[in-house]
Image (cartoon, rainbow, N blue to C red):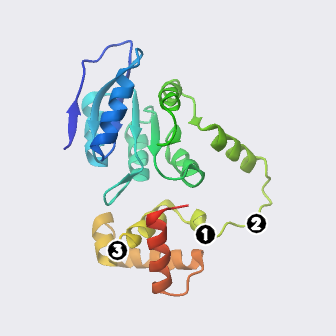
């Protein structure tokens, strides 16, 4: 679909760009945004590549982005946006468990994280907050992060998916989607040897003994990463 330009922009309103590969989600979010007197939908994008083009063309104040796209990684989109437009706030709105992903997207450069099950008020509050330069999370996630921060530095090392790098996490997700090492290498524009190294690192960190266990774990993770 690419980019769709929407209403005329005004200086007073917060200009919002939606990035999501589901048309129904984009439509619902657009209607929600356009109901608010202090914000307007200026455009939509259905992929990370079209999102980058849309930001250049439409100059939004805030990007509201999903985290998962067909064969692509929303975390890489956040990193690209931060590198190209360091002052542009991104609010992630995703179906994935915030307890796992929120800290990762904040580290990547986003200003907020909400799950799609949150209420309408949370979404519009999140847009306003990140526009004003404030980090926005759900109350439960804010409390969880505070608990982690006050837990001291003597916690035991983390094993499991939380110990994976963003790239290893992306490789794990693609393995779970049934892609071969060669396909993953082509999709991520990396060498086969690099992907094989990532696979070995993943097995070691997840304490998996062989490729079969890795595949079983990856499939479960692709269905519901928790």
Tell us which disc is closer to us: 1 or 3.
3
Tag 2: Cα neighbours inside 10 Å, few (<14), some, or many (≥20)? few
Give the image location of residue 17, x and y in percent: 34, 32
Residue placed under numbered mark 2 in the picture:
156
Q: Nearer the viewer, residue 212 or 87?
A: 212
Give the image location of residue 77, x and y in percent: 38, 48
Give the image location of residue 139, x and y in percent: 65, 37
48 sits left or right of 219 in the view: left
Mark 1 to mark 3 CA distance (whole Å): 21 Å
Residue placed under numbered mark 1 in the picture:
160
Tell us which disc is closer to us: 1 or 2.
1
Instruction: Say if residue 17 shows up in the picture.
Output: no
Contact flag, marks 2 and 3 (Cβ < 8 Å): no
Residue placed under numbered mark 3 in the picture:
178
Residue at disc 3, secondary structure: loop
Tag 1: Cα neighbours inside 10 Å, few (<14), some, or many (≥20)? few
How many circles with numbers are drawn on the protein? Answer: 3
Tag 3: Cα neighbours inside 10 Å, few (<14), some, or many (≥20)? some
Q: From this view, report whether residue 132 is shown above or below residue 154.
A: above
Mark 1 to mark 2 CA distance (whole Å): 13 Å
Q: Residue at x 48, y 30 (%)?
A: 120
> Image quarter for residue 71?
bottom left
Tell us which disc is closer to us: 2 or 3.
3
Return the disc, 1 or 3, that comes first in the chain's sequence: 1
> Image quarter for residue 140?
top right
> Image quarter for residue 45?
top left
Q: Residue at x 30, y 35 (%)?
A: 27
Q: Residue at x 35, y 22 (%)?
A: 34
Q: Where is the C terminus found, in terms of image quarters? A: bottom right
Instruction: Say if residue 217 shows up in the picture.
Output: yes
Q: From this view, report whether residue 27 is shown above or below residue 77.
A: above
């Amino acid at each position: 679909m690419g980019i769709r330009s929407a209403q005329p922009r005004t200086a007073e309103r917060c200009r919002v760009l939606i990035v999501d590969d589901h048309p129904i989600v984009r439509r619902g979010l657009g209607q929600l945004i356009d109901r608010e007197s202090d914000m307007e939908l200026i455009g939509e994008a259905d992929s990370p590549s079209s999102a980058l083009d849309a930001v250049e063309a439409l100059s939004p104040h805030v990007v509201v982005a999903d985290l998962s796209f067909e064969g692509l990684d929303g975390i890489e989109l956040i990193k690209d946006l931060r590198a190209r437009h360091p002052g542009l706030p991104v609010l992630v709105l995703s179906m994935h468990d915030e307890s796992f992903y929120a800290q990762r997207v904040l580290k990547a450069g986003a200003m907020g994280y909400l799950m799609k099950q949150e209420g309408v008020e949370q979404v519009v509050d999140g847009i306003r907050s990140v526009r004003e330069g404030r980090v926005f999370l759900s109350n439960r996630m804010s409390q969880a992060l505070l608990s982690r921060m006050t837990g001291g530095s003597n916690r035991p090392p983390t094993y499991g998916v939380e110990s994976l790098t963003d790239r290893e996490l992306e490789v794990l997700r693609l393995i779970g989607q049934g892609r071969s090492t060669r396909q993953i290498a082509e999709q991520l524009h990396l060498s086969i040897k690099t992907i094989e190294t990532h696979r070995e690192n993943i097995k070691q960190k997840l304490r998996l003994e062989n490729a079969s266990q890795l595949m079983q774990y990856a499939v479960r993770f692709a269905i519901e990463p928790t």
